[in-house]
Amino acid sequence: MLPNSVPVTRDNPPVPTFRAIRSTRAFEEVAAQIREELAKGTLKVGNRLPSERALSEQFGVSRNTLREALRSLEHAGLVRLQKGASGGAFIIEGSGEAITTGLLDLYHVGSIQPSHLTEARIWLESIIVREACQRATPADLQELRRNIKDAEDATEQRDFSRRAEVHLNFHRILARMTGNPIMVIVMDGVLSVLRHYIESIGEYENAFVLPSRKRFMKFMEVPDAEGAVAEMEASLKRLQRSYLSHAKQAALAGAAEAAAPLAKAPPKPRAARKPL
């Protein structure tokens, strides 16, 4: 029951009870307690958290500490912070943005190497294709065909950036066809990192992709899940070799360019000998 014996309804959800913080990293414990209330179901999507003043008093922390905790939950995709008279901190449905950001950070600091990225993509895609083939609807298959046509148009126009994005969207469509949000989120994260990787190696030729897509669609339409998986794996493994080859060439070119000024630098003059 809410205070003053107000019955619990959809418009009057249960009020979470928070404990005073004793930790030196107080904002982390504040965020952890809010996550606990989400796990218990006391807080649900659409609920607004109590005011900053009320929360800081319950937790026994300053408003700055509370705001730091709320910002961390916002970055994690769990809370929306809204300003104004009707504003506050709202529990939201969430998205995979935090996973994508985490994967990108790991890629940028070197914890995820290109070989890890392309290998994981092949493994993940095999699972997705098998399920997508079994669950495909006529509308899904039509969306894949439209994507292939868009890729053909981008290729004819020599628009590398658009061609790359359309090809990546083909895999996003397949992930959505599984009907599993985890597969959608994970695939989107992997493809977001892959997009950065593709941009770093620059334009490259992949004329084999579109013919492979058309063979793939024949398996999807039967449907033949094993045939579709085999065709996709063959195409992705060929792409993997192409990506890694281009990355190696770019790295060698960069090393040669960095070494060039050193090779051209004139020798330092010898210091004059002092008379004995």
Image (cartoon, grey):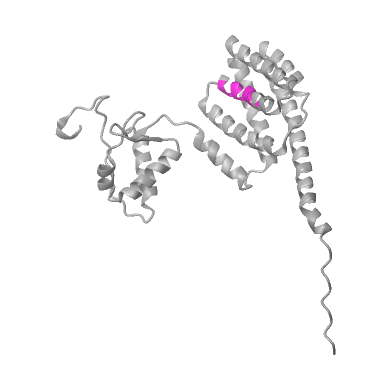
Is residue 32 visible to the viewer in this orientation of the structure? no
Q: Is residue 53 above or below residue 184?
A: below
Is residue 77 visible to the viewer in this orientation of the structure? yes
Q: Residue at x 26, y 41 (%)?
A: 17
x and y, in percent, of residue 87 in the image: 31, 33
Q: Is residue 167 left or right of residue 184?
A: right
Q: Which residues are magenta?
A: 168-176
Q: Is residue 259 above or below residue 270?
A: above
Q: Residue at x 74, y 26 (%)?
A: 235
Quarter of the image for residue 250 reads top right
Q: Residue at x 62, y 11 (%)?
A: 142
x and y, in percent, of residue 31 in the image: 38, 44
Q: Residue furthest bottom?
A: 276
Q: Is residue 132 left or right of residue 207?
A: left
Q: Is residue 130 magenta?
A: no
**Near-viewer residue (85 or 64):** 85
